[in-house]
Image (tube, helix red, strand yellow):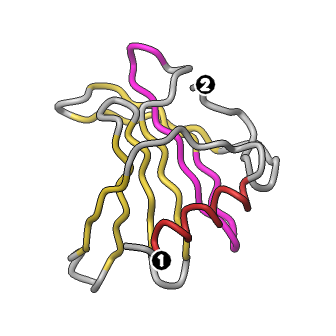
């Protein structure tokens, strides 16, 4: 999957920044954080155009997040439980997200969460 230039929700250009991680090397992150959505795409220095990880905040008030890990073929659901960064973590079967309709994707993810 290619990293988009525009946000799949609001269609505005995403902010791009680069960072260095000791074990992963250089990482490119494209983010869009708005009042009603928060989505981030990550890629590795070996191929900045290909998605490695996608993070979506499904519920901004309860800090419910979904991560699509394309290297491990896993989808992680986690929720920040308290300010000390304690979180609950669950996995669901991997599927490639369809960003052609962002709201439908969020509804699909919320449905998965209900049945956990």
Is residue 57 covered in magenta?
no
Look at the numbered disc 1 and give the secondary structure of its residue: helix
Left/right of residue 59 with respect to residue 73 in the rendered view: right
Query: Is there CB contact under 8 Å for labels 2 and 1?
Result: no
Q: Residue 116, how many percent across, how many down?
A: 37, 73
Numbered badge on residue 114? 1
Reading the image, the residue beneath label 2 is 2
Q: Residue at x 48, y 44 (%)?
A: 54
Q: Residue 101, how many percent across, how many down?
A: 77, 51
**Is residue 24 placed above or below 83 in the rendered structure?**
above
Look at the numbered disc 2 and give the secondary structure of its residue: loop
Stretch of the chain drawn in magenta: 31-47
Q: Residue 99, how many percent across, how many down?
A: 69, 44
Q: Residue at x 47, y 52 (%)?
A: 55
Q: Pick out the residue farthest to the left.
A: 23
Q: Quadrant of residue 110?
A: bottom right
**Is residue 90 placed above or below 86 in the rendered structure?**
above
Name the mark nearer the viewer: 2 or 1.
Answer: 1
Q: Residue 77, how many percent across, how many down?
A: 37, 63
Badge 1: how crowded within 10 Å, few (<14), some, or many (20+)? few
């Amino acid at each position: 999957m290619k990293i988009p230039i525009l946000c799949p929700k609001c269609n505005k250009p995403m902010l791009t920044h680069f960072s260095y991680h000791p074990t992963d090397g250089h990482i490119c992150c494209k983010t869009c954080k708005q009042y009603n959505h928060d989505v981030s795409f990550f890629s590795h220095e070996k191929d900045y155009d290909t998605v490695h990880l996608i993070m979506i905040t499904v519920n901004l008030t309860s800090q419910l997040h979904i991560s699509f890990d394309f290297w491990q073929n896993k989808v992680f659901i986690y929720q920040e439980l308290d300010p000390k960064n304690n979180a609950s973590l669950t996995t669901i079967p991997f599927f490639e997200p369809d960003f052609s309709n962002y709201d439908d994707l969020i509804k699909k993810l919320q449905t998965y969460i209900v049945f956990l």
